[in-house]
Image (spheres, coloured by chain):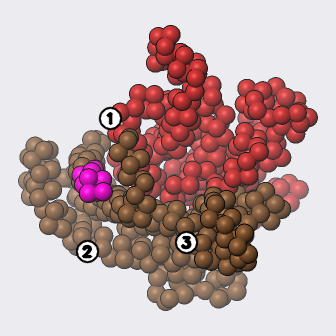
Amino acid sequence: MAEAGRIVAPPLAPTVGSASPWRRFHWAFVVGAGFFVIVCLLLILTPWIAPYDPAEQDLLNRLAPPSPAHWFGTDHLGRDILSRLLHGGRFSVSIAAIAVLITGTTGTLLGAISARVGGLLDDFLMRLVDALLAFPGVLIALFLVFILGPGYGTLIIALAIAGWTPFARLTRAVTLEINTRGYIEAAEALGCSRAFIIFRHVLPNAIGPVLAQGFLRFGHELITVGGLSYLGLGVQPPESDWGAMLADAQLYMIRAPWLVIVPGLTIFLTALSVTLAGHGLRQSLRRGGPRALGAVAAPKEPGT
Amino acid sequence: MARFIIRRVIFLVATLFVVSVLAFVVPYLGDTDPARQILRARLGGELALDPAVVEAVRRQFGLDQPLPFQYLRWLEAAITGDFGNSYTNRQPVIDIILRGLGVSFLLALSALVLATLIAVPLGILAALRPGGRRDSSIILMTQGLVALPEYWLAPLGMLVFALWLGWLPAAGWSSPLSVVLPAVVLSLRPLAYLLGVTRASMITVLESPYITAARSRGLSQLLTLRRHGLKNAMVPVMTLFSIWLAGTLGGSVVIEVIFAIPGLGRVMYDAVVNGDMPVVQAGVIATVGLAIVINTLTDIGYAILNPAIVVGDANG
């Protein structure tokens, strides 16, 4: 991690001073990002490392407790929980990742444009952001499922509609601050185009905070995806993801509590790792002011 | 000030209008035929339908008329509170929504009050020595709370407190004890956010000159906090409280489904699963409308308390 840190650090945290390279990043970022990278590697390698076929049933071995043969036990159809976790995680994590990529890009661009152009456009966009912030994301998803039917694509669209606002708010704030700098005035005086200023001056400055926000949002989206799948509105059978596994497990939770504990713990640890990474990254960016330590993600945000 | 309030109210009405158009028109954009959907919701399940029956239903509900015309007729009725009848049980939609809203309000309020009662003292505690060990551990705890999926905590809570210990009812909405488990689970995420805001706003207040002045006059820390700090620091906390209240009213779908609570979230979920379009439309308008109304009232209240905001707003 220290090596990776040394390569990435300069553009992200130009103000961080004389501390040795591995001190540049807050411990929370190193721990969180490290754990998350391991999760991603496991999910990428799933086809080769999963011990069983996730759909393979073994009805003589139903609801078996954890054992050397089945590390996390088996479910009500005798399917191996570990294999199902690995395969299901590919859906959960990829949906959240795609949603964060889409919302991060559009939100950041909209925020930067809004702040650079100003006027009516800015007014309109920010009111839209306010209105969307008040709208619970789960309801947008419910509404879309009503129209499009459940599935992978519906989930991504729902998350994309609801999720760009924190990025837009953040980038707008960063851009407004950059707007007052001398080099922007110079660029304007030289006749640089709006697009040039945004891509050359604004976005490079915004990338650090946006990245931190991206990690925080990733955790949020992962939990939302799990919730929708839990309700049966996400990935449809025979495919399964972490939320759907939890829903399946609930009927058997008295006989086999590990069926509920394991997938939930997986979602929790993955979400926690990215949240810590985002928190730590933000700390590294703003080290020096204790006030920065505070609030979680964007505070103005109702639940999932 | 008057101009600010008028602007906000105009925006409120405009947003409600756009939302009503979206809520009404968008469900028609899918390739589902509403007339067939009505029959399916009533009869339950996919059936081979007689085209003549479908045609009759279409005429009966006015679905053969152009969409803008249908919208205006619907809007006219909706303004008087008539959102039609549910496709599934034929009750007036407005009754279904109001009943759900009452339950959700009680649940959301219990959860948020609980969250505030814990978050504010902890936030202040963290703010007293920012960057200290106590502060860091409180912040670490909030990171954990944000990452906790409520659909995991809820079954676990049920397992431990209802099935193993037998202290609380597992699900349902029959006794006052029913509210405890869902409210606790629902309170954790807002707790984290409220704590963050309390802490940040308290740090700002504690750094301000009048606090230094009070301290230099020899007031104890507790007295300084009580007399000068707390009231000012609570304004952003109350704002966040009302925003969360608005969001939780329709947004606690998962919790309401898990605990079989007949709130608005549950109503919406059932309506989506059963294809009950009038309930979906009215439910969307009710939740979004309430959220925007609460937000606008908060903004106006905030502006009255702190007129500097209005100046900022007028400048864009």
Disc 1 to disc 2, C-alpha distance: 40 Å
Local crowd size for mark 3, using a 10 Å CA cut-off: few (<14), some (14–19), many (≥20): few
Which residue is pictured at 57% across the width and 39% down the height? A100
| Mark sitting on residue B95 | 2
Does the residue at mark 2 contact the one at mark 3 (Cβ under 8 Å)?
A: no
For label 1, the crowd category at 10 Å Cα-Cα, with few meaning under 14, some 14 to 19 and many 20 or more, is few
Residue range corresponding to the magenta coloring: B1-11
Disc 1 designates what residue?
A120
In this view, A86 is above or below B113: above
Q: Which amino acid type is marked by label 2?
A: Asp
Which structural element holds mark 2? helix
Please name which of the two marks, 2 or 3, marks the residue nearer to the observer: 3
Rendered view: B291 above or below B68: below
Give the image location of residue B201, x and y in percent.
60, 60
Q: Secondary structure at mark 3?
A: helix
The residue sitting at 27% across, 61% down in the picture is B282
Quadrant of residue B286 within the rendered picture = bottom left
B154 left or right, relative to B261: right
**Three-letter amino acid code at disc 1?**
Leu
Q: Chain of mark 1?
A: A
**Dot 2 crowding, Cα within 10 Å, few <14, some 14–19, many 20+:** some
**Left or right: B316 in relation to B188:** left
Badge 3 and badge 1 in a common chain: no
Give the x, y percent position of residue A135.
Answer: 41, 54
Instruction: Depth check: give the residue in front, B273 or B248.
Output: B248
Q: Is residue B184 left or right of residue B131?
A: left
